[in-house]
Image (cartoon, rainbow, N blue to C red):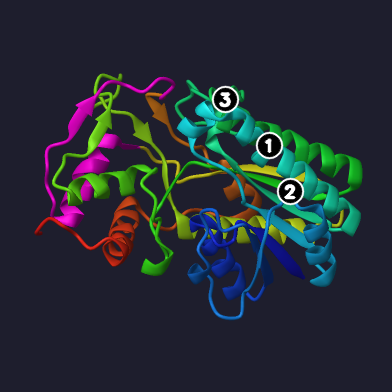
Amino acid sequence: MTWLITGGAGYIGAHVVRAMREAGERVVVLDDLSTGRPERLADGVELVRGSVSDRALLDRVLAGHAVSGVVHLAAKKQVGESVERPLHYYRENVTGLTVLLEAVVAAGVRSFLFSSSAAVYGVPAAELITEEEPCVPINPYGETKLAGEWLVRAAGRAHGLSTGCLRYFNVAGAAEPGLADLGVFNVIPMFFDRLTRGEGPRIFGADYPTPDGTGIRDYIHVADLADAHLAVARRLAERDEPGDLTVNIGRGEGVSVRELADLVAEVTGLSTKPVVEPRRPGDAAKAVASCDRISGELGWTARRGVRDMVESAWEGWRLHHPPTVAR
């Protein structure tokens, strides 16, 4: 079968494309290149530049490539920006998804995999967050992801789609340097950016009820995340009857922000004392996934550790950002 991967030239999307092609799946990428980079895609991967809000383009791509499954990763994803521009986020993440699903249904596509987020949970109190945890998002980004899940499942029930929703926790690392995360919005690249400028990494809050006072998070290697997409996509394609599979994607292990900062300093050789700043509104003391459902359903578990994430991310960072501080 052929999979359309929206946002496939992005950081996560390019890893999903790589994993699916290496497994023998046929893929075509749709990306507006607002944050995606064509050079992330290997030779032979067709890239269609455009938006999921362009219905005419979607109709041509779905029919022209005989697409039978969609992996939808294209979205706006910065929490702070979503607070400042909620209308933009709802238009891009929810209205765009609506147009895409309309085209999918019209084209007779049977499998739809949606990139969701642990942001749907808000500030959970559970030690390990299961998929049954109440979803109470606290920012427009999380709201759009939860609304997207509702919409995907409703379309699946009404039109006979097999659907999957993947709730990512904190994604890091790179399968190869050229696919590294080039932004400075996630914590590890943020640490790199500060350290290579001779500044201490910022830690938001050191007075949480945790062993070292900093927040505890679950980190997942982007290559493991890509493998999870492949596993769920294949399960959707194999189903005789439509249904939904909503799963957490994490490691089920917590790492504190201070522990992460220490590991980054060790890997980079750039040891600068962290700068502790006040807590950010809405940050949970601890957010760690229960991954029992995807393990039980598909036998999938993460294989790479946090050190792998930091080392591979650092290799990619150095490729794209020559250091300004002597190691």
| Residues tagged 2 and 1 counted as in contact (Cβ below 8 A) | yes
Residue lying at the far bottom of the rendered structure: 44
Work out whether residue 83 can be spotted. yes
Q: Residues within 10 Å of mark 3 (few under 14, many from 20)?
A: many
Work out whether residue 242 can be spotted. no
User: Hey, what amino acid is under mark 1?
Assistant: Arg
Residue assigned mark 3:
137
Between 165 and 9, the one lying in front of the other is 9
Q: Mark on residue 91?
A: 1
Q: Nearer the viewer, mark 3 or mark 2?
A: 2
Which SS class for mark 2? Answer: loop
- Give the side of residue 201 with respect to residue 20, left or right: left
What is the spatial separation of the Cα atoms under label 2 and label 1, in whole angstroms? 9 Å
What is the spatial separation of the Cα atoms under label 3 and label 1, in whole angstroms? 18 Å
Indicate whether 111 appears above or below 76.
below
Between 102 and 229, the one lying in front of the other is 102
- Give the side of residue 268 with respect to residue 234, left or right: left
Quarter holding residue 322: bottom left
Residue lying at the far left of the rendered structure: 326
Which SS class for mark 1? Answer: helix
- Residue 323 painted magenta: no
The magenta stretch spans which residues? Answer: 255-283
Picture coordinates of residue 179, whole percent (x, y): 43, 64
- Give the side of residue 184 with respect to residue 321, left or right: right
Picture coordinates of residue 304, whole percent (x, y): 39, 57
Residue assigned mark 2:
53
Q: Nearer the viewer, mark 3 or mark 1?
A: 1
Query: Sequence order check: which comes first, mark 3 or mark 2?
Result: 2
Between 274 and 319, the one lying in front of the other is 319
